[in-house]
Image (spheres, rainbow, N blue to C red):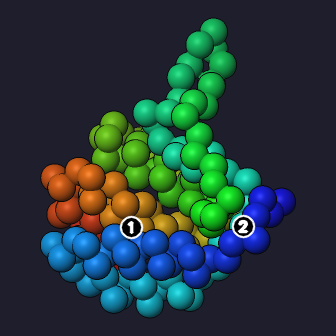
Amino acid sequence: ISTNKVNFNSYIERIQSYLNINSAIKNGDKLIKLLNNINPPNTFNHGDFSTHNQIEYNNKLYLIDPIYSEDLYQSYIIDAAKHLFSVLYYDLNTNLYNACYNEYTSKLNIDPTELDVLIACESIRVSNRKKQLIDISNNLIDTL
């Protein structure tokens, strides 16, 4: 279910703005070209679905610190990408990454190519605040 009238171009523009302010990211044009070939559905999402915003208590998972804004493009696929990036690069857990990736692509029918592009985009958003992750962003773009 769509939560607002914002289109995917606004997300692409946001990623382009991150690329514009971070000259250490290479092949940004390649990423933007790939972004222009996908169109994830506009749906409700958490907005910052990372492992840092999940708390387990009494065998239940609670999501905290959501980001919702009427002027941001939102999609559960972007949440999946943010989650996968955080599992792999914050938690360094390749087994969990692979398990979640397989669940997202098989059970939610998320296209793997689309997911990989969005994982690279989410890495760029994070690397603008955490410069030590720039090489990871460049590697993710190179593998696309």
Q: Amino acid at mark 2?
A: Asn
Give me the C-alpha separation between circle 2 and circle 1.
19 Å
Counting from the top left corner in percent of width and height, residue 51 is at 46, 36
CB contact under 8 Å: marks 2 and 1: no
Residue that numbered label 2 is attached to: 42
Relative image position of residue 95 (x, y in whole percent):
41, 41
Q: Secondary structure at mark 2?
A: loop
Picture quarter with the C terminus: bottom left
Res. 117 in view: no
Density class for disc 1 (Cα within 10 Å; few <14, some 14-19, many ≥20) is many
Residue closer to the observer: 82 or 44: 44
The residue sitting at 47% across, 85% down in the picture is 34
Left or right: where 105 falls relative to 35: right
Type of amino acid under label 1: Ala
Q: Secondary structure at mark 1?
A: helix
**Outermost top residue:** 58
Residue at the (27%, 59%) spot, across then down: 128
| Residue lying at 56% horizontally and 19% vertically, measured from the top left | 56
Say if residue 111 shows up in the picture: yes
Quarter containing the N terminus: bottom right
Circle 2 packing at 10 Å, graded few (<14), some (14-19), many (20+), is many
Q: Is residue 1 left or right of residue 50?
A: right
Instruction: Judge whether 117 appears above or below 131 on screen.
Output: below
Mark 2 or 1: in front is: 2
What residue is disc 1 on? 120
Q: Residue at x 53, y 30 (%)?
A: 54
Q: Give the vertical position of 107 relative to 118 (above or below).
A: above
Looking at the image, is mark 2 or mark 1 earlier in the sequence?
2
- Residue 73 lies in what quarter of the image? bottom right
